Amino acid sequence: MTRKPITLITGANGEIGHGLIRYLAEQTNTPNIVAFDLKPLADDLLPLVHESIVGDILDTALLDSIGERYQLDTIYHLAALLSTTAEKYPELAHQVNVQGTVNLLALANKEAHTVKFIYPSSIAVYGLPDLDTKYNNPNIPEDQFLHPTTMYGVNKLYCEHLGEYYTKNYGQLDPTTKPSIDFRCVRFPGIISAFTVPSGGTSDYAPEMIHAAVQGNDYACFVREDTTIPFMVMPDAVQALIQLANAPSQRLTQRTYNVTSFSLSASDFAQKLQQTYPNITITYNPTPARQAIVDSWAHSLDDSCAHQDWGWSPEYDLDSAFDTYLLPNIEAHYAQYQLDAV
């Protein structure tokens, strides 16, 4: 049986998955995407994919059946338990985030050809010991302060190393074994979306604040007003994955790349929003455990390697993120919601 070459997207029903599906579908008239998620794919995306599979990445029999039916050319492995959820259920997070990744790497490694394995990591892999260290070390590169304090960060950092191992060192004691994986990882800052209500992320104070402001609601922020980490908006996150996947292999000098757009504090977010919504009130009621986690993350990221190796550059800076992407789209969303409720 001839196996159809496909691009496999796990966690396909998240917003990054939706963006990838739409972008990749525009590149070809023949659907070659297989979407994989715990939940059925959104109805409007079904015509854009070859098949939508509902299942669990811990189900190795199901994964093997995919490998038997399809030739895996590229895998975008997006499925994961996010940071706050992972802290509540650390053992489950390890199973999903690590064992699920191992299962997919093993599946890809069965192919006789090279499989691109595109993996999203996170600033949660960083672990700065105190605030003085954090603010005295801006623009942290990929190889410093890698001491994560959360299960999610530990999972992501370990999977970065797993991907590098499967690409460079798998089968190193057997001269007849050739690794078949080309692992490429984007290490994301906090991601803000105009279309998804935030849930499960420790950096969600920023998007929660924006969604509250657009609805005219006050917001009690769960971190201090001086809390600062890097961010980017969802369209740039999707493009970063696509650009890294399309980069010529000879240009890549490493396997994991930082990307970022802008860094600003929680109070900066509030002031930016109050320029448009002057009647909202933002207060600060830090949750000690979540505050400690965010304090351990980088103030800002050095993404110069991504710029140099594969031409990364975000489309949205702070002003365009708010003025042309976030606020107009979120306002339109809630306006439509109100119309639907009438």
Image (cartoon, rainbow, N blue to C red):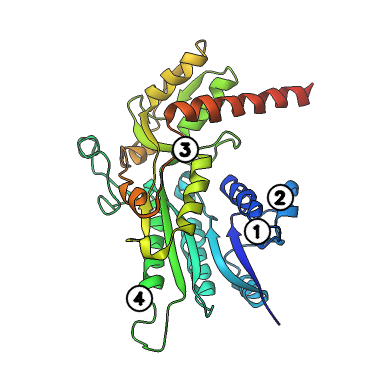
Q: SS for tag 1?
A: strand
Q: How many marks?
A: 4
Disc 1: CA contacts within 10 A as few (<14), some (14-19) or many (>=20): many
Q: Select label 3 or label 4 by which is in front.
A: 3
Residue matched to label 4: 169
Q: Earlier in the sequence, mark 3 or mark 4?
A: 4
Label 3, label 1: how far apart the Cα atoms are: 27 Å
Q: Select label 3 or label 1 by which is in front.
A: 3
Residue 45 position in % (x across, y down): 71, 50
Q: Earlier in the sequence, mark 3 or mark 1?
A: 1
Residue matched to label 3: 315
Pick the residue in front: 32 or 225: 32
The residue type indicated by label 3 comes to Glu
Q: Earlier in the sequence, mark 4 or mark 1?
A: 1
Residue 80 falls left or right of residue 341:
left
Q: Which mark is residue 35?
A: 1
Residue 217 falls left or right of residue 312:
right
The residue type indicated by label 4 comes to Asn
Residue 222 position in % (x across, y down): 43, 29
Mark 2 and mark 1 in contact? Answer it, CB < 8 Å.
yes
Disc 3: CA contacts within 10 A as few (<14), some (14-19) or many (>=20): few
Q: Looking at this view, name the residue that lies furthest to the top.
A: 279
Residue matched to label 2: 45
30 to 260, vertically: above or below = below
Label 4, label 2: how far apart the Cα atoms are: 38 Å
The residue type indicated by label 1 comes to Ala
Q: Earlier in the sequence, mark 2 or mark 3?
A: 2
Mark 3 and mark 4 in contact? Answer it, CB < 8 Å.
no
